[in-house]
Structures are given as structure tokens and as C-alpha cells.
Image (tube, rainbow, N blue to C red):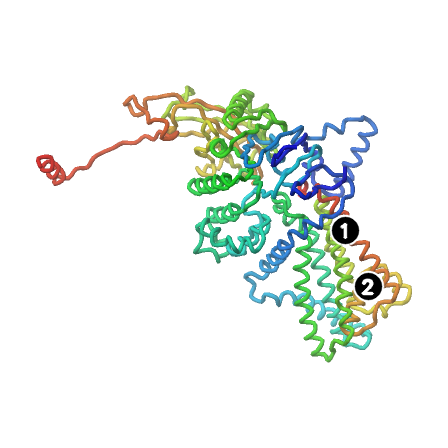
Amino acid sequence: MRPIHALQTEAGTTVIRPTSGWVPPRFGELWHHRQLLYFLAWRDLKVRYAQTLLGAVWTVFQPIALMVVFTLAFQRVGKVKTEGVPYQVFVLAGLTFWNFFSRAVTVGADSLTANAALVTKTSCPRLVIPLASLVSAFVDFAITLAFFFIFAAWYGTYPTWRIVVLPFALLLGVGFIAGFVLLLSALNVRYRDVRQALPFLIQIWLFLSPVAYPISLLGPRAARLLTLNPLVGIIDSVRWSLIGTNGPSPAALAFAIVISIVTLVVGLAYFARAERTIADLA
Amino acid sequence: MTDAAISAEGLGKRYRIRERVQATTLAESARTGLAVAARRVSKRGRLERKDFWALRDVSFQVDAGEILGVIGRNGAGKSSLLKILARITEPTEGTALVRGRVGSLLEVGTGFHPELSGRDNVYLNGAILGMRRSEIVRKFDEIVEFSGVEQFIDVPVKRFSSGMHVRLAFAVAAFLEPEILLVDEVLSVGDQAFQERCLGRMHEVTRDGRTVIFVSHNLAAVQSLCDRGLLLDGGRIVFEGTVGDTIEHYLTSIATTSQVSVRERKDRRGTGALRFTDVAVTSSEAGPVLVGGDAEIALGYESDAKPKHLFVSIAVAGPLGEPLFLCSNELSGDDLADATAVGTFRCTIPKLPLQPGRYSLNVFAQLNGVIADWIEHAAFFEVIDSDVFGTGRLPPSSHGPLVLQHSWSAEGAERDAATRASASHG
């Protein structure tokens, strides 16, 4: 007996039977319900901006506010050298991606519990739910990115040929985030501790990532240690493609690629495994 | 294999009580994990007792185009069965073969968002139910027309009345066109007229040769819709046959259980923070309940502590489970603040307007907004013939289960009498 949850045969017959252990993710169902992915992401965005006066301005408000705080704290006090670009531009470039990461992870981790009715009352594929939250976070990211280009141009920093690398750097980031979100959302159904611990974890993580400071500021040992954080390679790649600051070290980049792939595979596998009990626990 | 649309073979669903009841945190998990491990070492087999089979050994077939009604009391496994067939949850054992596209309707309006307009919600809900965008676009006007909320379709649904909300939600579901439709108790919402329209729509659906599995407490609806019935009890099939026979079986079985004292009943829901212990329906003089007489329903209860923010209700239903009326302290405005930890709630109904016959009642208690106890068919009571009008007559029962006391008068005008007199002369 093959450990497949439901087998769609030629005759359109679905076989329902118990499965156990590791099962492949249900990509077929996901593809079949791709329009739902769009509708759920669209709902997230529409609901968030309904009845707000400033709408999308709120999306860029958070990174701008943090940029101002970092500028006051690090630049005025500590005089950080930022690899040839104004500190404000350096920080906002990092925050643009960071904000995408933290928003996608926070909302994504809670997505299955927040949409408990979808999980317990409908048969729509579970994968759609965390992925839809990722899509809506990505739309927010695109808005923030557009604002960043205007902001950087104001300071005389323009994109160069390096911008063609941005999609690849983002692909790396999205892969890592997707894997992480799938893992956390499935874990959160079983252990609500995830939701409690996450804000704290993200706060610490921000300071362990080269957002407010360049990695070159650190000594070689600290830099090497920090490379264990996959966001180092990802953020340095994104920022390099945006404003031409120092790219990641080969080790950091290689590590980021490996960790992203591993996270994605583990996330998908754990989600597929946990999926069968999600409806009973959510 | 035959051309059955659905064939189930030995389906079973086990829940681990640990997963169902206890708070899910890492600390809990570590604690129970240790406890389980310790028990495993000391006494083998104790673990089994923590399991709960919501469904066991369920085998049946539904032919294409057939409409199967699944009935049974609370916790009989009806919803678990539908959830397995809808692939919301996996069976623990057994297999089921399902031929064709399945649409499931376990709740109307899943995913409806209050901030979004009616129009947006139709699209969203349609997508959730598995419709394609193009399909929703094509059916949009029909859906809105069926719901009857045309004027408000661009208003956020948070401004809808609950009736409008339900009608729009059902309208989307009513236009789902799967080959196999699984429906769970969704007709219990909405007003009578709309319910009838929904039943009519379902009749239409089934005339198209669609296969339907219909779960409901409303036996009258099951009887009118279904060809065949399946009676579940304690997770097992206890009867299978024509819908009439199945309902009869069910009624006999609940009549038997209601002789079990309420205290001993297992088919109840809620936290148990307050539990009903007995139910008695009498006339106010503790005699038999008469048509048009005063009735008193006494609910004995026990609770862990002095109950606060208490909401108690009694739903009275007819012989086929058709809802008749509801009495609750929330409706009457009595806050029951004097209730002690153990005691009796008394609900007095003056001039009970019911025809002679046998009625059942469901009892329900909520504490601080959480269901504490809920028993369906907690008791039956007989209403005895009585000459309420003093004419020796009662309305024929074909006009419904109600007997309302009323009076007539005629108000004449002189001219009318004169006209009639002249007319009869001509």
C-alpha cells in the first residue's frame, strides 16, 4: 500500500485511507486551488486597509520609523561606517527586507490557527493558508521596495546593473521564509508556545542580523560566528544588489543557500506530516 | 466493485483524549509525555483507555444519484464521518472510495469576513468551496438573486443582519455543482421561508442525479429529502434501511434512552462545569400536562461552584425533532443570580399551546459564555387532551402542533345588515 493520502486515479476516484509517517506534500491540490491562494492573499490585504485613512502608507511606516531610530542611535552616537552609502539608505535597504521577513513569519506562523474555520470546516488544501499569508506579505514588501527606490534616489543612490541579481537574492530569501513559515505554522497548531516565543525571537534576531550595522563593523571572529545566521548571506545579497554595498562572503552565501534549501525541505516535509492532524487540533 | 459513488469499508476514527482535551503547550506535552512513558513502563495497556473512537467499523455504500440521510444523536459520529469523506481529517483505519468531485458544506459562510462587502465575500467563499473564478462570475447574478440581498451587495457584511448573512452564505453554497455533495446540518439556520427555499433548491440539485449525504437533526427534512437512511450510535452503524424505517428506529432508541436518568446520560456536550441531573415536566399542580394548561419544567442540576453568568435554555421539539419553541432565561430576562451550586431551575409556561401528543426537549446551559452541558432529547413529555375551548373540540392536527386560545367577535354595522337583507330579497 503506497503511503499516499488520496490517490486521484484516471476514473476520478479518490481513495481515502489512513497514512503514516512521512508523506509527500500535496502540490497537486495546491495547484488546483491556486485561485484560492490569490483570493486569501487579496482578503488579507483588503481587510487590513479597509477603513484606514492612510492605507498603504502604514506598510512603509514601520521600516521608516525603525530607520529613524537606528539613525539616531547608531549614526549620531557610534558613527558607523556604511561602505560608501549614506547610513539612512544603508539601514532602509536592510529594513525593507527585514520587515518582509518579520511580517511574513509572524503572520504566517499564526495563519492556521487564525483560519481555524477553513481548516476544520472545509477541505481546501492546508498549504494554501500559510502560503497566502506569505503572498500578502510579499505584496507589502513590493510597496516598501518601491518607496525605498524613491528614498535612495533622494540621497543620490541609484540602482546599478547589480539589480538583475535581486530576483535571485529574493528567491533565496523567500525559500527560507516559506520553509520557516510552514514549519512554524504547523508547529503552532500543536504547540501554541510558538506564538508566545516568536516576537521575542524576532527581536533578538534583528540585532544578530546586519541590518543596523554592516558585518564589516565586526571583528573576524564575531563575523564568522554571525554567519551561522542565514539572514546574513541573504540580507547582504539583497543589499548588494540594491545599493552596491559589500556582498556576502562566499562562506556566508553558501551557508545561506544550504540553510534555505534545508529549511524549505524540512518545512514542507513537516507540514505534510502534520497536515493529517491539523483539523483535529486547530 | 460496483458503480457506487461512495463505498466505505471499515472506517474508523480514533481521537487521543490528550489531543482533544488538554491545553496544547510544550510544557503540557512534556508532562504528559513523561506520564505516558512512566505508565508504559509500569502498566502496559493502560494507554488504550485514553483513546476515544468517534467512529468504528463503518461500512456502507451510496449509489450514484442516491440521497443518504445520516441521523443519530450528539456524538454518534455523524460529523466525523462527513469530515473523513470530505477529506478534512484522515481516518484512523479503513478505506473509502469516492467517485467524482466532492463538495462539502459543513458550515455556511466559512471564511466570510465582516469587513468585506457581500460581493467580495461571494467570491472568497466560492473559492473556498472550490469554485473557479470564472464559475463564480458566471453564477454571480443568480447567487445574489437567490439570496435576496441585491441592494446591499456592496455593503460590508458586518452591517448585515444575521438573517441576510446566512442567506447570502447559503446562496453561494446552493450553487455549488459537485457530483457528490456532503451536507452537515446547515439548514438549521435562517428563517422558515428561506429554509424551504433551500430545501427546494436541494431537491432540484438531487433531481439532477447528484449523490448527496445529508446529516441533520431535523428528521422532517431528512424524511422529505432522503431515499435511504443510516443510523449511527456510539460511532457505529446500528441501522441501515429506508429513510422511514431508519427514523422509526431512531425514535424508538431515543425513547428508550430518555428512560435513563439524565444524570447517567453519556451523549452530552459541554465542559460539565454544570450538569443537569434530572428533568421533569409537570403541570403546575404536579399533575399531567394538559393542552392549554400551565406547565412547569424543572431541571435539577449540580455544578462545581455557585454558577455565574448563567444562560439556561430549553428547546421543545415535535415527534420528528422539528423545532417548536425555545425558552431561555436570557429571553425572559431572569438572571438566575440566586442559583446555588446544587438546585433546580424551574421554567413556567402558562397556557401551554400544544396539541395532544409526545414532545421532546433539549436542555442547554452555558456558564460565562462556555457551553457547560447540552443534552438532546433529555426528556419526553406527553400532552394530554383537554377541553381547552369548552367546546369539546381541538383543531385537526393537520394544521400543525399548536393550539392557541383565542376568541371571536363580530362587529356589525346597521347598513351592512340592511344591505344583506335587501340582497336576500332580490
Q: For mark 1, give the secondary structure.
A: helix
Q: Residues within 10 Å of mark 1 (few under 14, many from 20)?
A: many
Q: Quadrant of residue B40?
A: top right
How far apart are labels 1 and 2 at the CA level?
20 Å
The answer to whether tags 1 and 2 share a subunit is yes
Q: For mark 2, give the secondary structure.
A: helix
Camera-side mark, 1 or 2:
1
| Front residue of this view, candidates A104 and B76 | B76
The answer to whether A144 appears left or right of A78 in the picture is left
Outermost residue on the bottom side: it is A156
x, y percent for residue B130:
60, 49
Residue A124, visible in the rendered structure: yes
Residue type pointed to by label 1: Gly
Tell me which chain the residue with mark 1 is part of.
A
x, y percent for residue A196:
72, 50
Q: Quadrant of residue A148?
A: bottom right
Query: Quadrant where the N terminus of chain B lies?
Result: top right
Picture disc at residue A267: 1
Picture disc at residue A232: 2
Q: Residues within 10 Å of mark 2 (few under 14, many from 20)?
A: many
